Image (cartoon, rainbow, N blue to C red):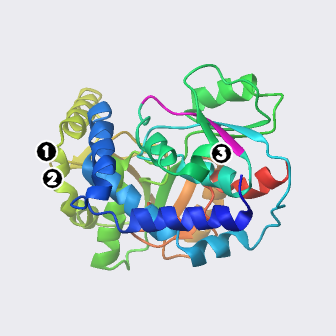
Amino acid sequence: MGTLSQRIRALVALGHYFKYFDENKPEYLPFVRAIEKANIENGWFRKKECLHAIACWGIALEKEKIQKWLAAYEIEENRTPKIIALVLAGNLPMVGFHDLIAIWVTGNIALVKCSSKDKVLIPFIVNNNSLLKSMTSFTSEKLEDFDAVIATGSNNAARYFNYYFSKYPSIIRKNRNGIAILNGKETKLELEGLGRDMLQYFGLGCRSVSKLYLPQGYDLNKIFGGIYPFSNLINVNKYANNYDYNKAIFLMSEFEFKENGFFMLKKDSAISSPIACAFYEFYTEYRLLKNQLDKQKDYIQCVVTNESHKSAVTFGSTQKPNLWDYADGVDTIRFLVSL
């Protein structure tokens, strides 16, 4: 397992490897090939998306940030390691990597079941680090012989997970989405940041903004202006197919919506929107809206806003979470050290 210091050093070294990724250097050629293979197996995982994920992890795994992350916990050096079954989602490249490093750094062993949509990058990374490889095994079979479980999936999958893993200590995650609350005072740069929050990774992430809360009378053209830098997404076949399909559904259902040739805005009370679309609602008082959202907190992953909100993140940063920004607000390290 190595000591805690050795595990931290391994993560820092991994962060350095990510941060200075250079496809023109021979030592990165196997990684480049892994990225290419990941894209072949999943059309959403373009090279651009994979490199963005790698760059974000390069920033997150800096020594000072890891130390800040772990400062709040007491991690025993000689505790008997637990085997943690890890069921990964596959909506974004390396989407379950935070859970994996949490298992490693607490001195536990990961039994990983990758999503069929993302079964290349994480195994490649693990198998090229001797310490992390010694703390990880992968399986495509039924999960057996483990002490606890962390599983992420759809709402339907979560119901299955809750039943199947009911006798084990567990963290079970289901669908959540990012939202944005605008007040009309946002700058052009903030609106462009909101565009990234909406369309980075094609809007497929649980931290992707799928719902907008706008002040009465807000000009929707400002939203379209903010997302314009992503207009070339319409040239990606998978995205264009979803855009055309969802637009056809809206038209056949005679829903009212606005669109700009590559994205749609639809007035709707739901939080989770389809690909190439965001839902929006108008509000009159932020105080009343905040009360409404408190009742919907189990469906919200993060909140992009300049207003005062406990889950607030700055515009443009939803896909760059810190190590201490836990999915669903569940402290993974606290869970693991308590086993």
Instruction: For mark 1, give the secondary structure.
Output: helix
Vertical placement of 246 versus 236: above or below? above
Query: Which of the 4 image quadrants contains residue 310?
Result: bottom right
In the image, residue 115 lies in the stretch drawn in magenta: yes
Examine the rendering and report whether any part of residue 46 can be seen: yes
Instruction: For mark 2, give the secondary structure.
Output: helix
Query: Which of the 4 image quadrants contains residue 212?
Result: bottom left
Asked if labels 3 and 2 touch by Cβ distance under 8 angstroms, the answer is no
In the image, residue 337 lies in the stretch drawn in magenta: no
Q: Position of residue 37 (x, y in %)?
A: 29, 37
Q: Which residue is mark 2?
A: 232
Going by the numbered disc 3, the residue's amino acid type is Met
Q: Which mark is residue 135?
A: 3
Using the numbered discs, state the Cα–Cα distance from disc 3 to disc 1 in whole angstroms: 41 Å
Is 73 positioned to the left or the right of 215 in the image? right
- Which residues are drawn in magenta? 109-116
Q: Position of residue 198 (x, y in %)?
A: 36, 56
Vertical placement of 173 versus 228: above or below? above
Q: Which residue is mark 1?
A: 235
Going by the numbered disc 2, the residue's amino acid type is Asn
Using the numbered discs, state the Cα–Cα distance from disc 1 to disc 2 in whole angstroms: 6 Å
Identity of the residue drawn at 27% across and 51% down:
29
Vertical placement of 312 versus 102: above or below? below
Instruction: For mark 3, give the secondary structure.
Output: loop
Identity of the residue drawn at 45% across and 68% down:
16
Going by the numbered disc 1, the residue's amino acid type is Asn
Asked if labels 1 and 3 touch by Cβ distance under 8 angstroms, the answer is no
**Residue farthest toward the top in the current orientation of the protein:** 142
Q: Decide: few, some or many residues near mark 2? Use Cα within 10 Å; few <14, some 14-19, many ≥20.
A: few
Asked if labels 2 and 1 touch by Cβ distance under 8 angstroms, the answer is yes
